[in-house]
Amino acid sequence: MSMHRTAFLLAALALTPIPALAAPTSEPMHFTSQQVELPGSDRVFPDGPGAEVVNNNCLACHSAGMVLTQPRLSKAQWTETVNKMVHVYKAPVDQADVQAIVDYLAALKPQP
């Protein structure tokens, strides 16, 4: 390609308007607040050793029904799940409560 042709192409590209940058939008964006009402539940976890700890920690984010319908998990799987809630999803669970939560959930629906 000749030097003259290259210079012409570069000049043409430089002068080509970019619509997104060249033309302002005709209408500014408007943001509004929305309100969503989530269903509530008075259901708690069944009585047993650790039920109070589970109710105090887990019901902040989950309904008891959602947790109680999970498949049977081993203690190791419940440990992994609870740790994921604490470390990945930042659930406000005191580390001292983690073992009681795991023990409760593993005993609630033991694997056959």
Image (cartoon, rainbow, N blue to C red):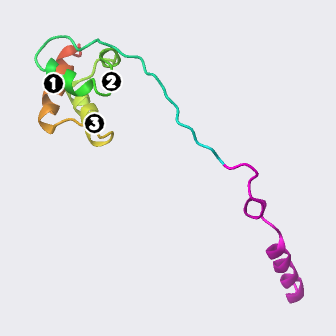
Residue 12 highlighted magenta (yes or no): yes
Amino acid, disc 1: Val
Q: Name the residue under label 2.
A: 62
Q: Nearer the viewer, residue 48 or 112?
A: 48
CA gap between label 1 and label 2 equals 14 Å
Residue at x 45%, y 22% (from the top left corner) = 37
Q: Which of 35 and 1 is in front in this view?
A: 35
Marking on residue 91? 3
Q: Name the residue under label 1.
A: 53
Q: Which of 47 and 56 is in front in this view?
A: 56
Tell me residue 59's x, y (percent).
27, 23
Amino acid, disc 3: Ala
Left or right for 91, reference 20: left
Left or right for 50, reference 37: left
Q: Which of marks 2 and 3 is nearer the N terminus?
A: 2
Residue at x 29%, y 35% (from the top left corner) = 85
Location of residue 58 by image quarter: top left
Q: Earlier in the sequence, mark 1 or mark 2?
A: 1
Is 25 placed above or below 61 here? below
Classify mark 3: residues with Cα within 10 Å, few (<14), some (14-19) or many (20+).
some
Q: Label 2, secondary structure: give it.
A: loop
Tell me residue 67's x, y (percent).
31, 19
Quadrant the C terminus occupies: top left
Q: Label 3, secondary structure: give it.
A: loop
Left or right for 28, reference 76: right
Location of residue 89 by image quarter: top left
Quadrant the N terminus occupies: bottom right
